[in-house]
Amino acid sequence: MIQVIAKKDIKSIVATKQIWIPMLILPTILCVIMPVLIVYLLQTHQLSLINGLDQMLRLIGEIPGKEGEMIRGMSDQSDQAIYLFVNYMLPPLYLLVPVITSTMIAANSFVGEKERRTLESLLFAPITIKDLFIGKLFAAFLPAISIAFGGFLLGAFIINFLTYGQFNSPLFLTTNWLMFILLIVPSLTILTILFTILISARVKGFQEAQQIGGITVLPIVGLLIGQVSGLFFFNPMIILLIGILLIIISVFLLLQIAKMNERHILFEKQVY
């Protein structure tokens, strides 16, 4: 039943242009066009066209450990700026891709059923509420994580192609990036979906669910501010701690969902 629900929702996503078109445009901009443009401007020493570059370069002196020494040891300021942008500024921006795409899908999970007039039969089908939510979770997770990984691989290939001769090594295969992609991205995507599905089950319209679900962008803004301000810098330990925290919160939300067996409440929230 979980598989049936997930397949049904994915088919409806593919058939809804207002959902899947923005899902493709967003990663193209955030993962490919914007990073490639900034790297190109830095390579061609058009530094004046990049706002906040001075603030970003000042952070180089605050990066601890061997990596900080390695960055400060680069003779070219352009090399320093490219390395700092790709490995410290880009990860929080990249997180916006799975979060926003999964929010768009998950926000449509229950209110979309209402608009298609299939909610009543779904709520009273022979399936537990927990399995119903898990089916909705997979329906949002699989497309969102596929698009996020696809955007990452495409952006990584292009940027590594542009910078390999400059650094003699790929910038996107650092330990931080691998842990970021394999730990934080999936766990944050799952947390975003669970939160947004809970919202979607309690509101009556797609726009309302999407607006409230947009709260999940705030932690990403916090990560970006932390990087830009020098409050902390990504390293394997910080990435591991953030990943564990996200997993704990996700498990808590899933346990809360497992306790939701009041079909009539979900019915009343959506229909009346």
Image: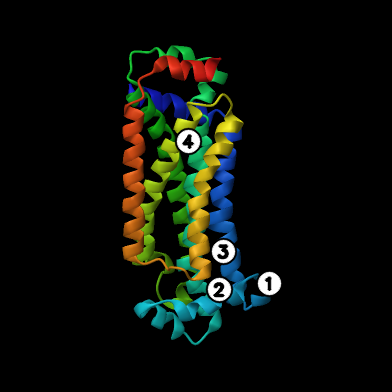
Question: Distance of mark 1 from mark 2, alpha carbons?
Answer: 14 Å
Residue indicated by mark 2:
56
Residue indicated by mark 1:
49
> In the rendered structure, are the residues bearing label 1 and label 2 in contact, judged by CB atoms less than 8 Å apart?
no
Q: Which-is-in-front pick, marks 2 and 3?
A: 2
Name the residue located 62 percent from the left edge and 71 percent from the top edge: 52
* In the displayed structure image, the side of residue 127 where residue 76 appears, left or right: right
* Callout 3 secondary element: helix
> In the rendered structure, are the residues bearing label 3 and label 1 in contact, judged by CB atoms less than 8 Å apart?
no
Name the residue located 55 percent from the left edge and 62 percent from the top edge: 35
Q: Amino acid at mark 3?
A: Val
| Residue 84 position within the rendered picture, expressed as x and y whole percent measured from the top left | 49, 72
Residue indicated by mark 4:
196
* Callout 1 secondary element: helix
* Callout 4 secondary element: helix
Q: Earlier in the sequence, mark 3 or mark 1?
A: 3
> Toward the viewer: 258 or 122?
258
Q: Amino acid at mark 2?
A: Met
Q: Which-is-in-front pick, marks 4 and 3?
A: 4
Q: Residues within 10 Å of mark 4 (few under 14, many from 20)?
A: many
Q: Residues within 10 Å of mark 1 (few under 14, many from 20)?
A: few
Q: Which-is-in-front pick, marks 3 and 1?
A: 1
Question: Distance of mark 4 from mark 2, alpha carbons?
Answer: 34 Å
Q: Earlier in the sequence, mark 4 or mark 3?
A: 3
Residue 51 vs 217, above or below: the answer is: below
Q: Earlier in the sequence, mark 1 or mark 2?
A: 1
The quadrant of the rendering that contains the C terminus is top right
Residue 128 vs 103, above or below: the answer is: above
* In the displayed structure image, the side of residue 28 where residue 131 appears, left or right: left
